[in-house]
Image: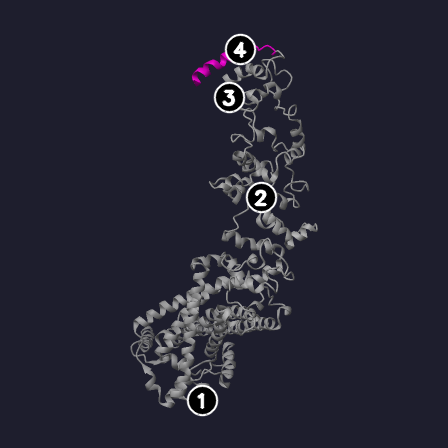
Amino acid sequence: MALVLGLAAPAFAKEAPAPKAPAAAKTAAEASQKCIDCHSEAEPGDKSAAGKSVLLDPAKHAKSLHGSGKAACVDCHADEGMRKYPHKSPKPAQCESCHAKAVKEYATTIHGMARAEGRMVAATCSDCHGTHDIKATSDDAAKTSRANLEATCGACHGNEKIIKEGKIPGGNVSALYHDSIHGRLLGGTTKAKDKVPVCTDCHGTHDMRPKRDPESAVSRANVPETCGTCHGKVKKVWAGSQHGKLRANNVLQAPGCTDCHGTHTIADPKTPKWQVGVIKECGGCHTEFIKTYRDTYHGQVTDLGFARMATCASCHGAHEVLPKSNPMSKVSEQRILATCQACHPKANANFVKFQPHANKHKKESGLILYYTTLFMQLLLAGVFAFFGLHTILWLYRSLAEMKAKRARPTRESEKH
Amino acid sequence: MASQVQAGQAAAAESRGAAQKYYERFDRVDRVMHAFLMTTFIGCAITGMPPLFSDEPWAAGLARALGGFEMAALIHRICAGVMIIVWLLHVVRIFGDAIRRTGFLAMVWGPNSMVPQPQDIIDIWLHFKWFVGKGPRPPFDRWTYWEKFDYWAVFWGMAIIGGSGLLLWFPAQFAAFLPGWVFNVATVVHGEEALLAVGFIFTIHFFNGHLRPEKFPMDLVIFTGRIPEHELKDERPAEYRRLVSEGRLESTETTRPTPWTETFGYLVGGTAVILGTLTVIVIVYSVVT
C-alpha cells in the first residue's frame, strides 16, 4: 500500500488537474470532496511549504463533527485562494465565523489573554478541540471529553519542555493532578470515576480565568464555592467554622479549602502522610501554637511521621474549627473532656487541665513550669560548664604527664 | 646499657603480669547492676532521642529503624521498667547493708559512704591545682568526688526521669489525684534531665572512667570487679593505706581476672562507648545547628 501510494504521489503532484471553483449551490460535503480526494492520497511525508503534513485521514475526518457534513474545508480554511489548486499553505483555521460566541469568550480566558499578550505557547481552539477530528465533548472520543481531558490539558501542562520554555505558571500540574485523590479516582474503577472533577470542572472551559481574577472559579474567594459544587456538606460545615465566618466577613486571608488541602496535590485525607503533613499547614498561620505543640509528645510523634497521636484536627476539629470561647468548639470548657476522652477514655477533670500549648519559656503558662524550665537549663549549663572545664584541664594534665613519663627513661639512660 | 633498660622493662612487665596482685573493688552484684543500668540506659537514650529531637532530619529515620514509634516506646518502657527495678533493688541493698552489717553512720559518713564530705571539697581544689601543675595528685580514697557526682547524678536522674516518666506513662491514673499542669512540668523535666543524663554519661563519665589517657581505651574494673595493686597504690593511695592500717588488705585480695571477663568487658564496654559517643555526636550536631 505504501508502495502504491509512493508511486502515485509524484503523479498526483504533477498531473492532477486544477479543481474548478465549486458552485455555490453544492453541499458542504460535496464542496469538500475535491479537497479530500487530493489530501487523502498524499504521502505521510508530504509537506506543505510551511512544513506541515498535508495528509488527511478521510475516515477520521468523516466521523468528526465537521466532516459529517456540517462544515466544508473552506469554511475553516477561509483564506483567499484556498478554493483553487495549487494553493498556498493556509493560515490557522478560523472558527469565529460559526463559533463567534465561543471565540469571544476565549479572549477572556487565561489562554486567550496570554495569546493577546503575544505568548503563543497558550492553547488556542484546536489545541483543546483538535482539528480534523473534532468531536462533541459528550463523545468519549472527543479531546474535550472527561475521559481525554487529562491528556489534552496534559499535552502542555504535563510536558516539562513546554512548561519550561513557555514559562507556564504552576509547573507540571498534570502530574500532580494525576497523583491526587481526584486523579487517582478518575483512573480507577470505582463509581467515583464518573464524578470526580477533571481540569475543567474546577477551572471552567471558555470561562477559564486566571485565579487572580476575582471572577475566576479558582480565585481565592470562589474556591469554596467551586469545591462545594461536589463537597456541599463539607462546605456548609466550613462556612460555620471560624475560618468560614472570617471569609464571610471578607477576611480573605482566612483559609479556604485549598490552603489546607492543596490544589492539584489534593490527597486522601485518610492517609497518615496527609494527616501529619497538614499540621504544617495549620502551623503556617498558627506559628506559636505549632511550636508549643511540638513540645508535647503528641507533636513530637506526629513530627516523626506517625499519625496515631493527636494532630491539630483531633482536638480542634477540621472543617468545624471554632475558638475555645465558643461552647460548640471541641476544645471549649463544655466539650474538652469528651474530646480528650476520645483517645484517653479515663481522662477526668484534672487530666484536661494539661496545657497542650504551654510555652515553657513564658510565665503566663504557669510559674512552676517556667521556673522548672529555667532551673533545668541552668543545671545543664552549670554541670556541663564545670565538668567541661574539668575534663579539658584533666586531659591536658594527663597528656603532659604521659609525655614526661615517656621522656624519663631516655634521660636516665643518658646518665649511665 | 640497652640490656639494662630491657631488663627493667621486663621486670615492670612481670610486675603487671602473673605476679600482679588484684583487689576487689566491685562485687558481683555491683557488676550485674551496672550491666543492667548500662544496657537499659542506652536503650532508653536511643529510643528517647527521636521524639526529643523530632524536627531533626535523622529523627524520623531512627524512629522507623527502631520499628516505628510504638516499638520505640515499648523498648523505652521495658528499659525504663528494668532500670526502675535496679534502682529500687539498689536502695534496698544499701539500707539492707546498713541494717545488717555496717550501720547507718557508715552509710552516710566515712570512706565507704557515697555521701559528699569535706574531704571531697579539698580533693576538688587539690585536683584542679594538679591540673594546672601547682601540686601533686591528691591521694584519693575509695570513692573520688567525680565518682560520687556520677553516682548522685544517676541516682537523682533516675528518680527524676523515672518519676516524670511514670507520670507521662500513666497520665489518666495520676490525674486522679494530680492537677493537669504536672504533666507539662513532667514533660519538660523528663526531656531536660534526659539530655543532661545522656550528655553527662556519654561524655564526662566516659572520659573520667574510660577515655582519659591513663585508662584509654577502657577501665575494665566495672566488668572484672578487680583493680590491680599498682593502680590501687597509684590512684587511691589513701584507700590502700587505710586497708593496710585496718588490716583488711589481705581479705580484699582476689584472683586475677579471667581472660573471658576481660574480653567481655572490652566488647560490651566498647560497644557502649561507641553507641554513646555516636549519640553525643548526633545530639551536639543537632543542638548546634
Instruction: Residue B111: give x, y in percent of width and height.
Output: 43, 85
Q: CA distance from mark 2 to mark 3?
A: 40 Å
Q: CA distance from mark 2 to mark 4?
A: 58 Å
Relative height, residue B143 to residue A165 (above, below): below
Pointer 1 local density, CA inside 10 Å: few below 14, some 14–19, many at least 20: few
Tag 4: amino acid: Ala
Kindly identify which chain the residue marked by label 1 belongs to: B
Q: Residue at x 45, y 57 (%)?
A: B64
Kindly identify which chain the residue marked by label 3 belongs to: A
**Residue A20 highlighted magenta (yes or no):** yes
Q: CA distance from mark 3 to mark 1?
A: 109 Å
Q: Residue at x 67, y 53 (%)?
A: A245
Q: Which mark is residue B105?
A: 1
Judging by the rendered image, the residue that carries numbered circle 3 is A57
Tag 2: amino acid: Cys
Depth order, front residue of A194/A158: A194
Judging by the rendered image, the residue that carries numbered circle 4 is A16
Q: CA distance from mark 1 to mark 4?
A: 125 Å
Kindly identify which chain the residue marked by label 2 belongs to: A
The earlier-in-sequence mark between 2 and 4 is 4
Q: Residue at x 48, y 75 (%)?
A: B159
- State the extent of the magenta-drawn residues as a range: A1-22
